Amino acid sequence: MTSAGALRFGADYSETIELTDGTRVRLRMGRPEDAPLLLEGFAQLSPDSRYSRFLAARESLTPAEVEYLTRPDGWDHVAIGALVDGPDGREHGIGVARFVRFADAPDAADVAVTVIDAYQRRGLGTALLRRLFEAARERGIRRLRFEVLADNRRMLALLHGLSPRVVEHVEGGVATGEVVLDDAAAAAPGAVAGGGGPGDGAATPAGGG
């Protein structure tokens, strides 16, 4: 475990990456002032992506969900967001990956990643998860639990591609499982791996929102 003051993925983390199509994207930690970006991004998710993310049809996020999702504490709840500059000169949120540590299992956390439809299949989900996995390792987390629709083969392929140690169980149309993190990094964080990220898309949200 890395001390809070020596974290690579700490409060000041910021990095610009290039997706497989050449799009430049800035990654940084989530902040309380990101509520408008979160709501804008949610509005750009298709009904299918929303269903994949929440395992239910959703038209909106509640104020309590927005409050929770935009106030990660940086240790037990970590969110890494992806932003692009729009033609209007403003930043726009296009994706987020997060984990929430389980209170009764401090070496384990719930994990999720979401990329808006317009930016799926460009390697962004893969890049976000690689960095989230490293952020989890830094904080002593060794097991990341997930829950996705069983027919969301792209997301399951992404998880299997990022770690050789993935266990999953399918029941009632939902795949639940665990990614076991090795002590060493899965890959160099600067790379966008996966040749376009076959699993880039939406998965169920960490922390229920």
Image (tube, grey):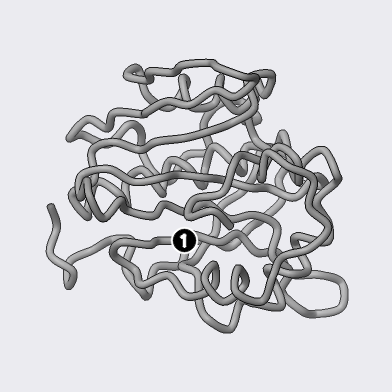
Taking the view exactly as shown, the residue that stands out farthest to the bottom is 33
The location of residue 54, given as percent across then percent down, is 66, 45
Q: Residue 152 falls in which quadrant of the image? A: top right
Left or right of 129: which side holds 25?
Answer: right
Q: Residue furthest front?
A: 172
Q: Look at 59% across and 31% down and name the residue there.
A: 148
Residue at 58% in and 57% down: 209
Front-lying residue, 61 or 164:
61
Q: Is residue 150 above or below residue 11?
A: above
Q: Residues within 10 Å of mark 1 (few under 14, many from 20)?
A: many
Residue 128: x and y in percent read: 51, 47
- From the viewer's perspective, tell me whether residue 186 is left or right of residue 196: left
| Residue at horizontal 14 percent and vertical 57 percent from the top | 2
Residue 34's place in the image compared with 56, above or below, is below
* Position of residue 30 measured from the top left corner of the image (x, y, whole percent): 50, 70
Quadrant housing residue 164:
top left
Residue 64 lies, in percent from the top left, at 60, 74
| Secondary element type, mark 1 | strand
Q: Report the number of discs.
A: 1
Q: Residue at x 60, y 68 (%)?
A: 65
Residue 66 in which image quadrant: bottom right
Give the amino acid at mark 1.
Ala
Q: Is residue 44 left or right of residue 83?
A: right
The residue identified by callout 1 is 79
Q: Is residue 100 above or below residue 40?
A: above
